[in-house]
Amino acid sequence: MNETSPQTLPQTIYLKDYTPFGWSVTSVHLTFKLHPTETRVISRIAFAPNPDAPAQSFFLHGEALKLISSKIDGAPCTPTLTPTGLTLDVPTGPFVFECEVEISPETNTALEGLYMSNGMYCTQCEAEGFRKITYYPDRPDVMGTFTVRIEGDAPVMLSNGNKGALGAGFAEWHDPWPKPAYLFALVAGDLLNYSDRFKTRSGRDVELNIWVRKGDEDKCAFGMKALKASMTWDEDVYGREYDLDIFNIVAVDDFNMGAMENKGLNIFNSSCVLASPETSTDDNFERIEAIIAHEYFHNWTGNRITCRDWFQLCLKEGLTVYRDSQFTSDLRSAPVKRISDVIDLRGRQFREDGGPLAHPVRPESFVEINNFYTATVYEKGAEVIGMLKRLVGDDAYYKALDLYFTRHDGDAATIEDWLKVFEEVTGRNLKRFKRWYSSAGTPRLSVKEKFNNGRYTLTFKQETPPTPGQPHKKPRVIPIAVGLLGSNGHEVQPTTLLEMTKRQQSFSFEGLAEKPVPSILRDFSAPVVLEYERSNAERAFLLAHDTDPFNKWDAGQALRRASLIASVTTGAAPDTAFLDAATRVARDDSLDPAFRALVLQPVSQDDLAASLHAQGHTPDPQAIYDASETMAQSLAQHLADSLPRLYAATTVDGPFVPDAKGAGKRALNGRILSMLTRMDGGAQARAQFDTANNMTLQSAALNALLAQDIGADQSAAFFTQWQSDRLVMDKWFAAQVAFAAPEKAANVAQALTTHPLFTVKNPNRFRAVFGALAMNHAGFHHASGQGYALLADWLIKLDALNPQTTARMCTAFQTFSRYDASRQTSAKSALERILSTNGLSRDTTEMVTRILEG
Ligand code: B3K
Ligand code: ZN
């Protein structure tokens, strides 16, 4: 299923080359005659010349299609076929193009286009999968109204829009909203529905369904609740209502990503919708709620207003991530959500921005667009919107959004359109701000302070290191939220927003009685690396007193990080300033348990490697691992006396409720239990494992034991208990690799690939093993080079089946040049081995080339 033959050089597509399509699509009729290997797709598409487009020849995308017949205005025609589509002479006025093609869903292992998963037909068209279904102008700026007829023997046959005629062996669907082909979807199979209804605020009665395989019906209630909460929230906060009579969600086991926002027919990776207390952790519940919201919110930000071209991807993704994070903050805890988002941003986006794969939030070129569904487009894209909202204020933000929705409803829009509504509503010039969209790399913000006669001055300097193709960076607009604390811990200056626009800029505060302690970048007001060298005493002070929860947490992180870096570079013992401060937080019952859990959470070893690298060291993954272990052990010892009491206090009475309150307590349970396990030889964890009545507590116990290499019995018991539940089995595969000691990780992963339940064809299972290996920092980067070699072996195997997931997993290698010469040599040879594979996909070729060329 490779997309490129080795002879064809992958072509680069540029933003600057955008030209509108020469025709518009007025209507699309599709008939599917379903068959596992010989599905027939009959299309009737009405085209009209587009007066705004330059003259061009008529071209329709199409890949891996067997053309059976084609007609123009009812008369047979003979298009010229190429590997990427067809060209044809067409009449000058409007015309109807009809064709019949044959495709083979069963052999489609790439999971793009129409494919099969456990006997069920299913589609994934974003970004460019529709061209594997039929010939079509497969680009987001071409929108048409679709009418679909599905013929087959499946009991349930679904497509976008509202229901049409339904009879023996067929189902029809009509979507009244014009849409690009990437939002097309079809599902057919033996499915059951969990249903409900929702009344929109203007009175539309909407049928809601979650479609699942038999046996999964009891895992839909939470997803349905999340869907209804999302529908209400979007009405309340953004004034956006649902616009069809039915909203369908389908769970599918084989899926390349989390979920897809097809109009009226969202398709979900089953791991992102199915939930039950026995099989899902609190993290799973929160993620499911957020993804359901995210896909639902796309109905307006993505579907009603779509993107002109794929370079504008952040227009829908950044905004929709921003909206789903607001939703989670409103439903759960805003500080906890902010802290978790920043952990994720630093872990994934900063890592991308600082390496060979760095690219702007709006990239200017690509080879394979699927390679640009990245943390930068999504998460940094969302941060840019957060900054904009901070700069213009809440009122102007919602006014601008209202204008955006009215002005661009039905459009395929651009970032320029988006910024223009803000300029019009606020009268601001956003030219400089726009650099956030065009310039890659994470700005480093350094700070100097001065205190003189009651005047306190902060001088900031911004510097963005070069990124591939962008050696020089212009200064950006950076919103810096600052508060000041007095020596007694009281706030002497509440949060103020400073707007930095220059390379270097000073801001002063007058009338202060003493030199304050600054709390800078509150709520993480901009996605930058703050370089402010403070004393550990000041950090401990902020951890104790800062009124901003994010900075309070970050002060603890900074303390822990400084101590770990000192251990790695000088062999210093864990810093007592950190141990004392963390102990105080852990014991402070007035603090939210979720917050305490976050303070006690270890610093990511990959982040430490990045910090060491930024400071000019060559990070040694084993030394980082050892220092992290020593730190965890010391903290457990420091807290030893309190651990039993703290552990007991994490008990949640009554039935499991996956809300923020219970989840916070259980998160703290996990942290305390992992410390206890270091002190009691695992007694408490074994007891918890045996009595747990929910997956959060059960997996916390298993993980704590596995981390100390004393979990073999529980792992076996877990397997016996859950072997028939595929989603829980993914946890089992992942945990063994994630918690393996560095020297064992690759062997454990390798052994798991011979397990009867391992399959390279299911992305969830593949990611469970190899995603976990890539996340085991010291294991993946082990000096033996085994981690690199093993991942390369399996990426080569996977690429022949599924290029998209392969390319994505290549990102594990993106940091290889941080490490020593011998590791670099092993990583390079693994990458070169991938690259020299015969028939390697365009997706993987692009990724590996970019990583190697850095
Ligand atoms: N828009 C989809 C992602 C499509 C990825 C294509 N490789 C899901 C989402 O962001 O909601
Ligand atoms: Zn999205």
Image: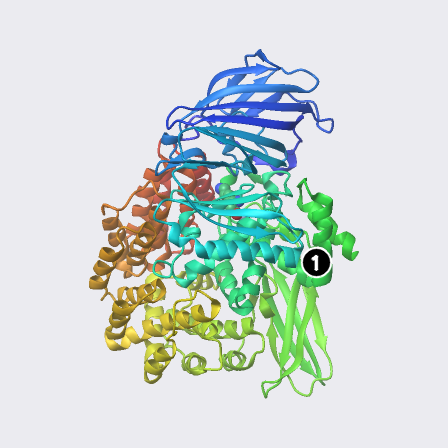
Q: Is residue 525 left or right of residue 708?
A: right
Q: Say how the picture is coloured.
A: rainbow
Front-most of 118 and 847? 118
Position of residue 343 measured from the top left corner of the image (x, y, whole percent): 48, 63
Q: Quadrant of residue 117 in the image?
A: top left
> What quarter of the picture does the N terminus occupy?
top left
Q: 841 and 612: which one is in front?
A: 841
Kindly give the residue lying farthest to the front in the view shown: 167
In the displayed structure, 460 sits above or below 106; it is below
Q: Where is residue 80? Give x, y as percent.
A: 54, 16
Of residues 404 and 217, which is closer to you in this image?
217
Residue 603, quarter of the rendered image: bottom left
The residue beneath circle 1 is: 397
Mark 1, other Cα within 10 Å: few <14 / some 14–19 / many ≥20: many
Q: Nearer the viewer, residue 735 or 478?
A: 735
Horizontal and vertical percent position of residue 517:
60, 80
Q: Cβ(mark 1) to ligand 2 < 8 Å?
A: no
Disc 1 element: helix
Image vertical order of residue 240 relative to residue 846, above or below: below
Say which residue appears at 29% left-offset and 47% top-offset.
790
Q: Which residue in the rendered view is the most extreme toward the right?
A: 427
Task: Please indicate, yes or no, whether residue 77 appears anywhere in the rendered image.
Answer: yes
Indicate left or right for 400 with 216 as reference.
right
Q: In the image, what residue type sits under mark 1?
A: Tyr
Q: Residue at x 66, y 22 (%)?
A: 56
Does residue 1 appear in the picture of this structure?
no
Q: Looking at the picture, does residue 23 appear above or below residue 357?
A: above
Residue at the image position 45 percent from the left and 82 percent from the top: 589
Q: Residue at x 32, y 71 (%)?
A: 674
Q: Position of residue 135 (x, y in %)?
A: 53, 24
